[in-house]
Amino acid sequence: MLEATELECERGGRTLFRGLCFALAPGELLRIGGANGSGKTSLLRILCGLLTPTGGGVRWKGAPIAELREDYSRQLVYLGHAPAVKDDLSPGENLDIACRLVGVQTHKEALTWALNAFAVPEVPVRKLSQGQRRRAALARLLLSESVPLWLLDEPFAALDAAAASYTEELIGRHLGAGGSVVYTTHQPAGIDTRARLVQL
């Protein structure tokens, strides 16, 4: 279970949120809502351990994530709002590196299968559209179905209807298998009806 207790975040001398509390159990979906600049990305970065909160804390299965460190990072997938892909590498090379960084060993066939599922061409990333870049990043979810916690920042940004629907299907499957998902989005999604909302 993921637990946030009395979280506070201050950036640039401005308090984005304070006193934020919630718990997320296996199989649950949580949507982070709020206007631009309200702290949605900062909250996700706090939840995955990339940003230290001004106050409060985050626990995973009862233990503070600051103490778990690498053990916790292996239990989650974090996809930021900007696709973290390098222009000079192919989508397959980017995906392989992303998996290896978190200790996931994959075969070339699995990488190809995941990218094909999202219809990502195997060309240098600099030649891809924004939507294709997003799909290349999302392909990691197909190789992370056994990872219990997904933290997704604007997963539907720049996607066409087919890719957005497929992403929702993957999230639904993950929840059905007992995984947990926290996500932000500015656009309506079919999965919103299944999600609890934390409004910033």
Image (cartoon, rainbow, N blue to C red):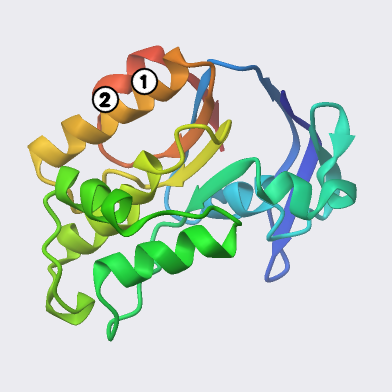
Provide the secondary structure element on which disc 1 rests: helix
From the viewer's perspective, tell me whether residue 61 is left or right of residue 170: right
Residue under pointer 2: 169
- State whether residue 33 is above or below residue 89: above
Point out residue 68 in the picture as x, y percentages from the top left corner: 84, 47
Residue positioned 32% across, 21% down in the render = 191
Point out residue 7 in the picture as x, y percentages from the top left corner: 78, 41
Q: Which mark is residue 47?
A: none
- State whether residue 132 is above or below residue 192: below
Give amino acid for label 1.
Arg
Residue positioned 43% across, 24% down in the render = 174
Q: Are marks 2 and 1 in contact (CB under 8 Å)?
A: yes
Q: Is residue 83 visible?
A: no
Residue 88: image quadrant is bottom left
Residue positioned 26% across, 25% down in the render = 169
From the viewer's perspective, tell me whether residue 91 is left or right of residue 100: left
Give amino acid for label 2.
Glu
How busy is the neighbourhood of tag 1: few (under 14 within 10 Å), some, or many (20 plus)? some
Point out residue 11 in the picture as x, y percentages from the top left corner: 68, 65
